[in-house]
Amino acid sequence: MNQPLKILFLAAEAAPYIKVGGLADVAGSLPKALRALGHDVRIALPRHKPIEGARFGLKLAAAPFSVPVGAGEKSTEVLESSADGVPAYFAWDEYYFGRDKVYGYDDDAQRFVFFGRAMLTFIKQFGWQPDVIHANDWHTGYVPTWLATVGKADPFYAPIATAYTIHNVFYHGTTGNTILRFAGLEGHVRHLEVEPPGDVNWMARGIAHSDVVNTVSKRYAQEILTAEFGAGMESLLKARNAERRLFGILNGVDYGVWDPAADPRLAQRFDAESLDTRALNKAALQRELGLPVRDDVPLLGFVSRLVEQKGVDLLSAVLDRLFSRDVQFVLLATGDKRYEDLFAALPKRFPHKAAILLKFDEALAQRIYGGSDMFLMPSRSEPCGLGQIIAMRYGSVPVARATGGLADTVIDFDAGNGTRKGAGFTFNDYTGDAFWGALLRALDVFRDKKAWRGLQERGMKADFSWNASAKKYEELYRKAIEFHKG
């Protein structure tokens, strides 16, 4: 029988402590699922200023210690807490992390290198040696790079294997190569072919130096090997794939959090056996949004970021055709100003049909999942996507482009040669016409209440929990250990 593993999970954000995007959901849920399998999993993240110390009972994990930075040292401290039985460590430095946001500063690369250096120093000071360090996205790419170069000469660090997860390959963390001196790597690493001259790409570094690399869906692991999706790093990714070190593992969802039968934010709780009562959520949402309360009109929801990656250009391309129909539409999002301006004008252009909320509101998002009839995800690329999984769990039928994790999770209603299978509507070509075709099919089937109920029930009963995915991550860690020893 395999022995339990000791795993340190590194991320820039993690629920419930702080959340900007889907990474926080994964960092909050996957360690809990791994712990349920018997592993000693601990997470580490910066102690960002918005993390409330009193709320999470933060306390000092160890006496302040010195972290090497460049040619000198900087004193720091690590705080600790726990959620759902998973210990969490927080690297604190007022200069680097005493800021209002998680990301978006000119010195982000330096800030996250410091986080990595602090946590590497901490585990040795603390005397806890993990079997595997699981790094996530470019913010943690420094750690496997250091371990594979400088760290391998230290008996404490040399045995530690590394796994690196790409949540979105388009975010590189590129910065000038003078950071190598700050990072303690100058003279220890060579320039990578995929890096611009004079720059360091921390995503590429994480990919190149980890024992194993994975993406958050099987389809995305194949897509990033192409020029369309590889973001300029497809040659490096192909090399790692040729070594059989690149994998795809679909993200899961914590059904303890995303459960319409127990969600206090819904007007009416429900499950697959009580779908009739879901109509109360739709009516409540319509009232909240100032839309006419009508059960017979389809209510379409969009909860995302207003950036091209999310297919916002496709959405804007079909708006006139969409609003020529008897529909209602709610958008909850923030992003590029040109898109915000475009959507902000819709309620005046289409009164009683459009509700536009340009903000982040997690409670309202859950009410949109629980009250909308359709959930739109026309993404140009989608490494995994959680929105479509949550929408299906809440009885909202996704209309999505078949890319990345969307292709792995949304089975098209027309699949099966006309038999009534599937839990959503998909399209392939990245065009407004292809998206409109999928919307038309969805609007047509919406009128068939029996067929629509079948779509909802199949989506709600689909199992995208972390149980299966956590076991695959366990396998991934053991592969990392084998590669590391070899």
Image (cartoon, grey):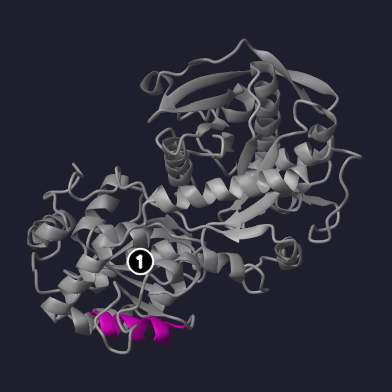
- Write the start and end of the magenta stretch as one range: 431-442
Look at 57% across and 31% down and name the residue there.
46
x, y percentage for residue 245? 69, 57
69, above or below 189, in the image: above
- The residue closer to the viewer here, 152 or 432, is 152
Outermost residue toward the right in this view? 187
Mark 1 crowd level (few <14, some 14–19, many ≥20, 10 Å Cα): many
Outermost residue toward the bottom in this view? 417
Element carrying mark 1: helix
Look at 76% across and 67% down and name the residue there.
235
326, above or below 65, in the image: below
Does the magenta stretch mainly form a helix, a strand or a loop?
helix
Is 49 displayed left or right of 343 in the figure?
A: right
- The residue closer to the viewer here, 148 or 99, is 148
x, y percentage for residue 19? 44, 41
292, above or below 116, in the image: below
Question: Do we see residue 241 in this rendering?
Answer: yes
Question: Do we see residue 373 in this rendering?
Answer: no
Residue 441 falls in which quadrant of the image? bottom left
**Magenta includes 446?**
no
Q: Mark 1 points at which residue?
A: 343
Residue 181 falls in which quadrant of the image? top right
x, y percentage for residue 79? 53, 19
Q: Which amino acid does label 1 sit on?
A: Phe
Look at 63% across and 22% down and name the residue there.
128
Q: Quadrant of the N terminus?
A: top right
Look at 26% across and 73% down and name the residue there.
349
x, y percentage for residue 383? 52, 62
118, above or below 257, in the image: above
